[in-house]
Amino acid sequence: MAISEPIIAAPAHRDQQLSRTWGQPPGFWGWFKNVHHTAIGIRYMVTSFIFFLLGGVLAGILRWQLARPENNAVGPDLYNQIFTVHGSTMIFLFAVPMMFQGFGVYLVPLICGARNIAFPRLNAFSYYIYLVGGLLLWGGLLLNTGADAGWFSYVPLSGPEFTAGKRSDIWAQMITFTEVSALAVAICIATTILRHRAPGMTLNRMPIILWEKLTIAIAVIFAMPAVMVVSSMLLMDRTINTQFFNPSVGGDVLLYQHLFWFFGHPEVYIIFLPGTAIISTLVPVFSRRHIFGYVPIVTSVVATGFLGFSVWVHHMFATGLPQMSESFFTAASLMIVIPTATQFYCWMATIWHGRLQFKLPMLWVFGFFFVFLIGGLSGVMLASVPLDWQVHDTFFIVAHFHYVLIGGALFPMFAGLYFWIPKFTGRMMDDHLGRIHFWLFFVGFNLTFFTMHFLGLRGMPRRVYTYTPEMHWGTLNLLSSVGVLFMTAGVLVFLVNFFRSKRYGKLAGADPWGAGTLEWATSSPPPAYNFLELPTVNGREALWDAEPNQPIVGGIREDIPEMLVTNSLDSEPQYKEEMPGPSIWPFLTSIAVSIAFIWSIFSPWGIAYGAIPVTIALIGWLWPRGKSPTPRYDNPRMEKSWNG
Amino acid sequence: MERLRERPILDVSGLPSVAFGRANTTWFANVLYMTIEGTMFALVIASYFYLRTRSQDWPPYQLPPSLWYGVANAVVFLLSVIPARIAQRAAPEGDRRQIRIALLALAAFAVVNMVIRGFEFTALNCRWYDNAYGSAVWALIGLHTGHLITEFVETLTILAISFTDKMEGTRLADVAINSDYWYFVVITAVIVDFVIYGTTRLL
Amino acid sequence: MSAIFILAGLPGDHRVLQPAGPQGANIEWLYWVVFWILLVVYVLVVLGFTHAGKRAYTPARGILPIIKDRSGDRRAAWVVGIAVTLTVLTLFAVLFMTVITGKKVEGLTSKNPITIQVIGHQWWWEVIYPNSQPDQTVTTANEIHLPVGKPVVILTNSADVIHSFWAPNVNGKRDLLPGYSSAFWMQVDQPGTYHGQCAEFCGLQHAHMGFSIVAESEDQFRAWKEQQLKPAPEPSSPGAGHGREVFLTHACVMCHTIRGTDAGSRMGPDLTHLASRNMIAAETLPNTRGALAGWIIDPQRIKPGNHMAPNLLEPGDLEDLLTYLETLQ
């Protein structure tokens, strides 16, 4: 490929052409045909944020009930449904869909310098499937047949003998929906990162956020099957009388726990690592320098993803396993601290040797440093088997995981939202309101969850709907519940800020922060075709390291949606792929799949009969449409045998 | 970034619009998909062996599954690799006639596989509701059968496309990728057969 | 910071940190050592970030240019390298202490322990002191007596779902898994009554599944055991006699055993020595006449969802029944 200097047509004409080619159809049905990643990414972020609010309301109810001993605001049955749906919502319907799917689907193609995500229809399908899964779980709750055996739904409690009705079945299928969605997005994101990066973006120049999303995609691919398998086994035990977990005929209750936690532990890294990637993205921008320790940080991210699979038994320390295996898992659980600690030191070094512009997103970054660290350190305590024997399944654990999840994902999420919302909407958020939000949330969070450490040490187990006054847990519980008011106020301030700024916020322009990654190389919000000129890359921060004469990519067709495919290591151009345009098939297929999955809650034949509409929809999806332009093959013989 | 006239161009206009083999993005997605499904198989097999450690006898109270249907099916699976490979080689050459014949043969093999699989189900000597052993056996062979059926339908679809004028460009690459997935079905069949039929007799 | 001390100082017991036996003490030791190490780490990291922030802080409107000079990075590499090394060493120290403590806690064994079987039920604890001779086997519920200073081995099992046996003053917890029976060793060195509670979510009344461990002198323990082995005494008053008749002609016999009568069901707790216990309904209510009355009439009001149905009794019957139950010392 030559580097030449032809004259290019004036931008206005090209904008029209590209908008025609890449634009998504308007109107009601147009919404269901949209296959552009920015639209799907926004849907993920909005939907998952709504689930966050709903999950928060449930948490508020839990804290209301626990604020006083022997309170009777909520009885045990409803309480059990509420904490189950709270946990399931936060993990399956909010954390992963926001941190991995939402941010990932929106940002990854832009940061790669591409016009769309790989497999756009699969991406669109993944959103509808996720939405149905969420509606299923909440439908159950609102009909008083909500899942009620905990977010992890242990057997035998969730099995056929001890949970009547459809509660656990609803949970199990919610899992299926959300995991299929996450797996689909993992395939799209992994392919985009490995094959659609801008020329010049070698692996060594890949932004840390792409390394993280790639790692997470691989982790999802290996972890989700475990929860699919175990939830299917549960569903089968309940609907068709399999005996996987029935000890009297050879089944085993610990099989459930092993399979579940083999998924469950990587899951929390699937939630946490995106948080660290946001930090690794924001710290350089607001320290006005390249990140310190790119190689150690990338190594840490990949290592954490990998090691996350080696620690699952630390959720089972109280089950009476042999001491040798427990020691191994203590060692592995302590070892996994090392990569995260490395990242912390590198971030500290970056700020130390930088020029800190303490803008609003950075306030949240510092919040992450101080809050997540407490959770990480309490995690060191939990890695130690004897300590875990005491505090496992108590409020000490509840404190720990809220510190790591809220500190490690939610604080970075708000940092990322304040950072990227200007890109999504084109307008800046209000700085002052953002700081009020921070302090309200910071104070409320610590009040609610720090007190829980003490409650655990005082002997308060988890998942109890009430407690007696003699336990002396009342004051701490009351303080913990008061914290919720502050957090709620903070989130309300955020919502007010968001809606006002969307209308009246200062116009952001392409790059309000002076950042280095490619999403800032186009307008805010980006046009339907992402970039007018497809960039090439010269360094780890594409915009900061660009040459004055940094080449752009030419020769991609603009009359059809064509994307450049590059090779995995060096991002050398390999071929040009015609991408699918808007299509109703992802939506139709998701309807068919939803029918099959939901039917199977009520009858095992659901999968069999439901497979028929799914097959029809998939054939419709895969059937080639219209006549594509004549393909260009690499193989000269092909032109001859074309009509053979 | 909008200073167009001064920017040098990296000209990719000469690049092909189709790639075969590892360069193809759908090939890569297929690899990821096989990884996902392979992990599911691995976990179900691991569960099978884990449950085995929790029982004195294995199979408990039952005969192991009858050997012959399983062996017959394994042989048919292994033979089916031939038409799959023929289709795979014909695709990058654009030899549509060869593709049609090979895919037809592959579909025929798949039908034979499914028929024998039906007999296998009747000869497992256990039921999924008997005990954990029966559940594990049926889960394993059921999981594989699901893949067999979906791959058969996919082969038929591509076969149908090969009779139209749409068998061009990326669709040709899809023929080759479909064969890769068929190999996955064959390999998992052999492994599942070994676990169900072999380990109950050998171990 | 001071808020934390206030919170820690509120009235009430941090049971995990008030061990009554050697295992609890070992774990408490480990807790404090690890806590102080982690506190130092936290303070250092917080100071590091604060100092980094202060040092690098540059007030400016608009956007500052990118720093191209990375000469400080070489020194930073050394510092980060040292920090990572210190982190690794600290983690090894924690690992080392963990393994030692684990060995000590698990190392409590004896050739002649007191053996107790604890079987978890939804939502009570079946407690059996097994013996090869049936008439030497003690069966009770929710209250475990043991002699001070002697190793005890608990054989765990569950009759239904997973429960977890946890008395924080004494030791860590052990899950009760259906299909598994594990040996869980304990020892209490200080006499007293220690609260325990189920620590694995087990359904509707998980919150009300408590038990207590009564640690007493060797003599007291032997006396208690002797008493528990006796069958229920014959009623001495007509009221108690009528009360026994009420018991035997109502739903009570469907679930409860009173040795010395025809009531022999094992579905619910053994009531032969009900009156000897401090609390009822798995540590939910004190064992008083009034509380017992309320429990018998409507258990669903106190523990909604539990397996004991309400009993409609005439006031006279109820009074006599209570009188009878009070004789079951």
Image (cartoon, coloured by chain):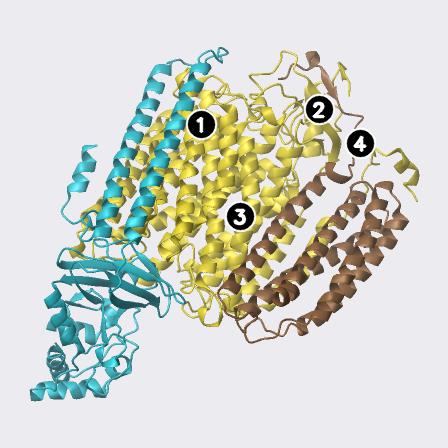
Instruction: Mark 2 vs mark 4: give the one in front.
Output: 4
Mark 3: give few (<14), some (14-19) or many (20+) Cα within 10 Å: many
- Is residue C196 among the parts visible in the rendering? yes
Residue appearing at x 64%, y 53% in the figure: A589
Please name whichever residue, A520 or A27, is drawn nearer the observer in this view of the structure. A520
Residue appearing at x 28%, y 30% in the figure: C40
Which residue type does callout 4 highlight?
Pro
Q: Is residue A347 above or below residue A45?
A: above
Q: Residue furthest front?
A: C111
Instruction: Mark 2 vs mark 1: give the one in front.
Output: 2
Question: Element under label 4?
Answer: loop
Quarter holding residue A14? top right
**Quick one: which chain is cyan?**
C
Q: Is residue C238 above or below residue A328?
A: below
Q: Which residue is mark 1?
A: A504
Label 2, label 1: how far apart the Cα atoms are: 30 Å
Instruction: Mark 3 vs mark 1: give the one in front.
Output: 3
Question: Element under label 1?
Answer: helix
Mark 2: give few (<14), some (14-19) or many (20+) Cα within 10 Å: some
Q: Which residue is mark 2?
A: A14
Which residue type does callout 1 highlight?
Tyr
Q: Which residue is mark 4?
A: B16
